């Protein structure tokens, strides 16, 4: 099987709405020889920040001398981004080989998919890591936690729960406590767990930990102190469990990454990693698509829900400005689009917003978002220019044509939009 043939197999699989039960997936793993057995797994759930926390932990553990597998989603440009070992993507040859092997071994009743898109990629990843035997394997949940396919692995060395907000409410519940209950489904008996202590979600997580006997450590962010930083960086200090302070520098301007870094610090402490390795691992970490500067004055951010848009705007406001701010914005239909548009309108940060679709049936058409934005009456009207495009390439070309020295251009609202922007930036 070639790499292109492997892509065709995977792209023909159904999405997460058709996923199998955890017992069914565990049975599938047993049929495949239990590739998860013996792997030291760090399992990460949450609404926002879990990919960043996974990346930070990977860099910290590599700095400490460990070989680290990393399974994340979604990808931005290349599907192989989801399966990494020591920072390197799985090779096209290994990806195609394992996809071919898995396709031959999976059996299902006629007319029933043997696996969903996400499940199949998880199985490919576990087969790959079973061959390579990393010291740690970091698994990012795809959706929720309790019923997420990643929760089918038999043993976990550490569970991590990041920030919880309203997202995927049609699957996880309408309230923060309901969503927290789903995320807390990754907690395991007698297993260390790290969680971000937040007012609405903490009681639910703590109750679940008591029920199963998980060993909880809370992440506290109230002691974080911002420090002066070089251009393009964030710097802060926070207290360590060793009664001294970390001095952390991050290669990003995304304000929300401070919280994610503190979660990673706490998780690394639970694993016994030294202060020096934690600080250096965080400094060298880079996670694409999170306030990433693709070229001078052009930033992309995967602010894919209302909470993400809120913290994206906080970061935008702190970036020095000499000219005008412009925004390319896209959103998925199953997100809180009205709230996202309201946040943009109230911010007053942009001189121009170009709403656009992207290459997915889930994308809200640019014209629809522009109409909704202009129809809103709440909040302050930023009086910015509003336009719309059918595709993100047209939006990118139009706004780049008006870009001048000192201006800032942002693309946000969906990680799929970020992926398309990264492709255009290569041309």
Image: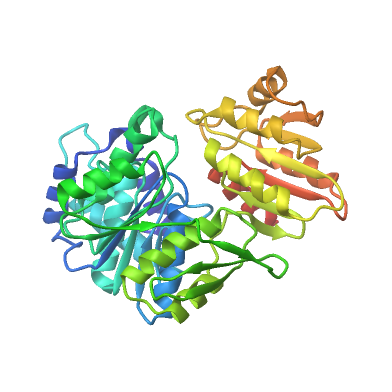
Q: How many marks?
A: 0
Q: For residue 15, what is the image quadrant?
A: top left
Left or right: where does residue 371 sit relative to residue 153?
right
Instruction: Name which residue lies at 43% across and 71% down.
Output: 240
| Direction from residue 237 to residue 376 in the image, left or right | right
Q: Nearer the viewer, residue 151 or 127?
A: 151
Instruction: Decide if residue 150 is in sight here.
Output: yes
Question: Which is more toward the observer, 270 or 306?
Answer: 270
Q: Position of residue 276 (x, y in %)?
A: 47, 81
Quadrant for the N terminus, please.
bottom left
**Picture coordinates of residue 235, whole percent (x, y):** 62, 67
The image position of residue 279, as x and y in percent, is 50, 75
Observer-nearest of 412 and 127: 412
Residue at point 15%, 43% (across, down): 24
Question: Which residue is located at x 73 percent, y 60 percent?
Answer: 295
Q: Is residue 174 above or below residue 157?
A: above
Residue 90 makes an appearance in the image:
no
Residue 22 at x, y percent in the picture = 18, 43
User: In the image, what residue occupies the spot 45% across and 39% down?
Assistant: 165
């Amino acid at each position: 099987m070639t790499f292109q043939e492997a892509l065709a197999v995977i792209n023909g699989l159904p999405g997460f709405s058709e996923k199998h039960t955890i017992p069914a997936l565990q049975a599938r793993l047993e049929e495949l020889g239990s590739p998860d057995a013996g792997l030291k797994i760090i399992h990460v759930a949450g609404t926002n920040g879990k990919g960043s926390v996974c990346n930070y932990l990977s860099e910290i553990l590599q700095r400490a001398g460990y070989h680290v597998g990393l399974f994340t989603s979604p990808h931005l440009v290349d599907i192989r981004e989801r399966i990494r070992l020591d920072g390197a993507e799985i090779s096209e040859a290994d990806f195609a080989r394992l996809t071919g092997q898995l396709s031959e071994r999976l059996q299902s009743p006629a007319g029933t998919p043997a696996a969903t898109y996400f499940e199949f990629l998880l199985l490919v990843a576990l087969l790959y890591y079973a061959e390579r035997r990393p010291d740690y394997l970091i698994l990012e949940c795809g959706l929720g936690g309790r019923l997420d396919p990643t929760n089918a692995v038999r043993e976990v060395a550490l569970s991590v729960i990041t920030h919880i907000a309203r997202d995927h409410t049609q699957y996880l519940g309408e309230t923060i406590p309901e969503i927290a209950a789903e995320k807390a489904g990754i907690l395991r008996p007698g297993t260390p767990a790290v969680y971000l202590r937040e007012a609405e979600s903490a009681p639910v997580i703590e109750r679940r930990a008591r029920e199963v006997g998980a060993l909880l450590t809370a992440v506290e962010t109230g002691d974080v102190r911002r420090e002066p930083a070089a251009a393009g960086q964030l710097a802060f200090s926070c207290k360590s469990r060793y009664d001294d302070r970390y001095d952390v520098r991050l290669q990003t301007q995304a304000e929300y990454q401070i919280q994610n870094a503190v979660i990673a610090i706490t998780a690394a402490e639970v694993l016994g990693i030294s202060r020096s390795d934690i600080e250096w691992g965080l400094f060298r970490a880079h996670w694409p698509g999170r306030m990433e500067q693709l070229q001078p004055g052009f930033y992309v951010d995967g602010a894919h829900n209302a909470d993400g848009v809120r913290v994206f705007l906080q970061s935008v406001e702190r970036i020095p400005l000499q000219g005008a701010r412009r925004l390319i914005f896209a959103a998925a239909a199953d997100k809180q689009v009205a709230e996202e548009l309201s946040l943009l309108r109230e911010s007053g940060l942009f001189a121009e917003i170009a709403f656009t679709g992207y290459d997915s049936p889930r994308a809200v058409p640019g014209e629809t978002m522009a109409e909704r934005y202009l129809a809103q009456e709440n909040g302050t009207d930023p009086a910015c220019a509003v336009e719309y495009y059918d595709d993100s390439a047209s939006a990118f070309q139009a706004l780049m044509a008006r870009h001048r020295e000192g201006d800032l251009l942002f693309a946000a609202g969906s990680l799929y939009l970020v992926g398309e922007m990264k492709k255009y930036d290569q041309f």
